[in-house]
Amino acid sequence: MTELDTDRKEVSISEFFDKNKQMLGFDSPQKALFMTVKEAVDNSLDACADAGILPEISVKIEEAGKEKFRVEIMDNGPGIVRSEVANSFGKMLYGSRFFKERQTRGQQGLGISAAILYAQKTTGFPTEIITKVEKDMTAFHFVLDIDIKKNSPHTISITPEIWDVKSGLKITLVLKGKYVSGKQSVEEYIRESAVANPHTTFHLILPDKSLEIVRSVNEPPQIPIAVKPHPHGVELGELISILREYESETIEEILEDKFSRVTKQTARSIVEKSKLKDKKITKLTRDEFEELLRTIRETDFMEPKKDCLSPIGDEPLFKSAMNSFKEYHPAYFSQAVVRGPFVFSGHPFLVEAIAIYGGDLPKEDPIKILRFANRVPLLYQSGSCAITRAISSLNWNQYGFSQPVKDQVPIGPLIVAVHVASTKIPFTSEAKEAIATVPEIMEALDVLLKGVARQIKTMRKKEAYKGQVEEKFALIEQILPQIAEKSSKILGLEPPDITPIISKVMGVVAFREIGGELYAENYTEKLQNFKVVLKGEGTFTESVKNLKPFQKVKLNFTKEIVSSTEIYVDLPEPVLLGAYTLPKVFSDE
Amino acid sequence: MTELDTDRKEVSISEFFDKNKQMLGFDSPQKALFMTVKEAVDNSLDACADAGILPEISVKIEEAGKEKFRVEIMDNGPGIVRSEVANSFGKMLYGSRFFKERQTRGQQGLGISAAILYAQKTTGFPTEIITKVEKDMTAFHFVLDIDIKKNSPHTISITPEIWDVKSGLKITLVLKGKYVSGKQSVEEYIRESAVANPHTTFHLILPDKSLEIVRSVNEPPQIPIAVKPHPHGVELGELISILREYESETIEEILEDKFSRVTKQTARSIVEKSKLKDKKITKLTRDEFEELLRTIRETDFMEPKKDCLSPIGDEPLFKSAMNSFKEYHPAYFSQAVVRGPFVFSGHPFLVEAIAIYGGDLPKEDPIKILRFANRVPLLYQSGSCAITRAISSLNWNQYGFSQPVKDQVPIGPLIVAVHVASTKIPFTSEAKEAIATVPEIMEALDVLLKGVARQIKTMRKKEAYKGQVEEKFALIEQILPQIAEKSSKILGLEPPDITPIISKVMGVVAFREIGGELYAENYTEKLQNFKVVLKGEGTFTESVKNLKPFQKVKLNFTKEIVSSTEIYVDLPEPVLLGAYTLPKVFSDE
């Protein structure tokens, strides 16, 4: 019993995480190196996003001894003012993004401090930070580590320094690490970051290679704007404490002020329905609070505003996927699909996805899943992530993929990239490696994924159908004329006009490559007008006007373009053979 | 840029977890109900373990409205003294188990406070705690919740109360929840807890059923004793801070005092080898610290002591598995295997496992994995747990199981129960649902699992071999005598003595059930002495002395026993047919 009664104490959050590094993702030297880069890069991207700056980020990793690495991350972000540097880096649970209802990468005020803590614990080295804000003449160079027992920064030195940039931040850490390439590496992380952040340029200097990824989009994304919580997410205890906090106001005023999408009128009607008109908050009973919550839940509100979120967007995601996966020479890309915003526990979220099929993708391996949360690639803890679970729970056999075991990842030459964007990603741990399987998110993902899976299924069916193009052309060009000729000879007649038969067999506008040239042929009974778009490294367009029935036209694309691009036409599918229907995304170009 | 410079703040740990409930496992109403029971029961088991009490724990769940449940957990533990109750329940990161190097279920000082926080946020109800310690005349009844912004208890009332027990604790919460039965339910959690804690009696009153699980072991486990950290786990930064903290002492003294397994002599030799004799700690350079660490790493120390750990143990685990899985009528149990202690980052750990095969277990489903960490069942986040990953990474085809996809869980009628026990389980999150894939743990699990998988493979082979028993008996009893008779008739001779041929064919002691009776027959050429043990619901033993070659003996077990038990004999395998070699575990009984 004595065990229980003595020796109790409180520990600081830094002490707690010092002893539980794995919760922040620092499980092993390899993971620690990865996490350090990730936390710093995510911070840089967030800082640039807030300032509307197109990010240019350099990551440099050098060996600095046995199992020891020097890691330097530099950005062109807005920098941090001198007075805030020490706390921002040297204190856990300190930051500017807590509980703001808008989409950001960092939310916790933990990540970079965890890296600093890990560095000092494993190598004894403090961290160096150089930062310049636009309004200051010089940059400031900080050397600091963390006083773990107090959870506060321990600043060793601050010196002014000339740094010839408008603004920016550079952080250098020396830590125990293990450098790997390939799966779950720093390089993979940066490559996938580029998929989700096509507006960013990355410079990478790694121990075994250097590379540069140049932005493919030249506009920074819109800055997400904070919103108030949506009333559908509030729980009873929370509602009570919000009302009590502002008890000098009326219930109506609080509902209107503290929640989004609650108009004066709705607030009034809620209070009336709950029979709480003119009641003082201090006098409310539990039953009355419960009645108020019930009324709120039964009330329809507008969906949350989208402008607190920053989706990649259907067109940039499609472009980014085309750009990033061209090495596989995939046979098809699904269209990028964006769904939402929805709400869970009052937090708006949306989901987007794209699927890439075939080409050189391995046929016998589990499909490749790219997971993103608020534009950050998730490379670990795949098995417990909502995205993987949603994918595994589909019945893939019905989309033409092999799924040997129910509820496990299917097999086949497919990449599925999925992005969940929210004002609050419900991560399963501080390491932010997996999204919790919150019912509302699972449901949204399920519908989203069925959408892209169905697209791929349709495209594969279309491919089989495209195989019939050749058969049909063989029919109209060789067999039908022969039959016509033979039968007329037997009957001693002139060969008949087989045009009506042909247009009945075909009934479409057909596209064919003959010797590298692209031809459009009208096998319908009316005039056809359409736009042909070839999409690959670039986009090439040609319009065809008034193509008469049974007329054929050669299109003016070069052989190189025809061979390396996909053919899209703005005609509906039954009137089209040998090309794809133009996705909505392109139709305004 | 303004975004970056203004509005930074620090939040309390309670506020942080209030907004990140899923990190503590409170993702959904269903999970919340589960976690609440789990945290309270784990606390009860820990408290009883510390006090050497055989635990008797009652769990009662009642519906208290729509999606609202009243949960009551009562134990016969030592209770908590009045002055510590409020902080122990109402303050996060407060507790008695932080950083103690010994095996306990709770380590964080978070779990039960999280349940209280969740209850107050979802229903507005405070938590009630009644506790009595042995030395007090009365119990005390607390009503409290948590002041989230301050991370401190908000005590509503304390009243003395008569509770007629020696000591104990009862906690009652009202929370938003969803009650389920079956997979990942409270019932499953309690059933698996009983597997890992066979010394505990559970009373369960659930909304849809009541049940009682009575302890099968009547001794409490040994109380684990705290040890100092093992020197092989220390990192440079940590070593520097320990040395600096005690800088008035010599390096030798600190090494001997602050670490386990470092003798005066080893400490002296480390200091001499590092050329640091008589050096003052305040004067040491980074290179000298590094040299000291290098020497420590190159020094052999004894493995950590086991008494900080509380494994289930091979015999209790075997018994517990037999008891818990009898409903499947399994064909085989592997022996329970315990391996360790090993060390990761200075923390001792050991691993133990048992496998159960066949019977009514489903043949077409993934195998069932039971995961335990410090005797606590892990029911969620299976995919990212070291145990599941270690199982998936075996090549199961080579053990006779189907594994359609590499690195995924195999298919077959098998249960594998695995326990990791450590002074510090590296959980991936505060919800303590999955063990991080720490390299040392992965390696230990790999060897452990290969061991039990091989046992099952061997048993299946033996089963095939046992099928040959019937064949061999048919040979000696029917075919050989017929051949002998026929050949002698043809030759007009007396039938020959075929005994030498039979003993050559058989060469074993054979065990056969005939009409429910068990017979032992000696088909070897020498006298045999052995002990026969029948194991099932109970254990039944009989010794056979001086069984002569070609002699047969009927054993005195009843028909009921023979039919419902496994037959074990203390003879080596080649001298044995139709029974199992007696496992080491039983041989002392």
Image (cartoon, coloured by chain):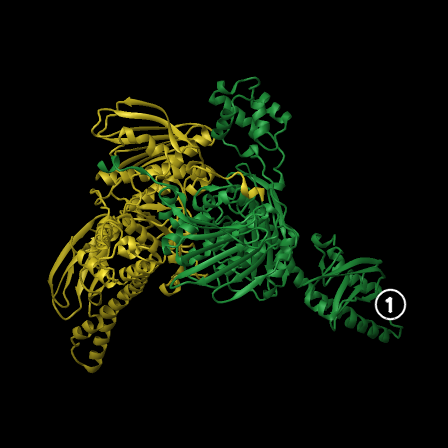
Chain colours: A yellow, B green
State the residue in front, A369 or A92: A92
Would you say A284 lies left or right of B306 here? left
State the residue in front, A501 or A197: A197
Q: How many labels does the image show?
A: 1
Element marked by disc 1 = loop
- Residue A387: x %, y % from top left: 37, 54
Q: Residue at x 84, y 62 (%)?
A: B549
Would you say B579 lies left or right of B355 here? right
Question: Which image quadrant is residue A518 in?
Answer: bottom left
State the residue in front, A345 or B46: B46
Q: Which residue is drawn at 23% across and 77% down?
A: A486
The correct choice, above or below, for A491 with respect to B467 in the image is below
The correct choice, above or below, for B86 with respect to B301 in the image is below
* Local crowd size for mark 1, using a 10 Å CA cut-off: few (<14), some (14–19), many (≥20): few
Q: Give the amino acid type for the residue marked by disc 1 in the picture.
A: Asp
**Mark 1 sits on what residue?**
B497
- Residue A487: x %, y % from top left: 22, 79
Whether residue B31 is visible, yes or no, is no
State the residue in front, B86 or A94: B86
Would you say B188 lies left or right of A79 here? right
Chain containing the residue with disc 1: B
Please, which residue is most extreme toward the left here? A546
Q: In which quarter of the image is the C terminus of chain B?
A: bottom right
Would you say B559 lies left or right of A495 here? right
- Residue B366: x %, y % from top left: 50, 60
- Residue B228: x %, y % from top left: 57, 34
Q: Quadrant of the N terminus of chain B?
A: top left
Whether residue B138 is visible, yes or no, is yes
Question: Which image quadrant is residue B355 in?
Answer: bottom right
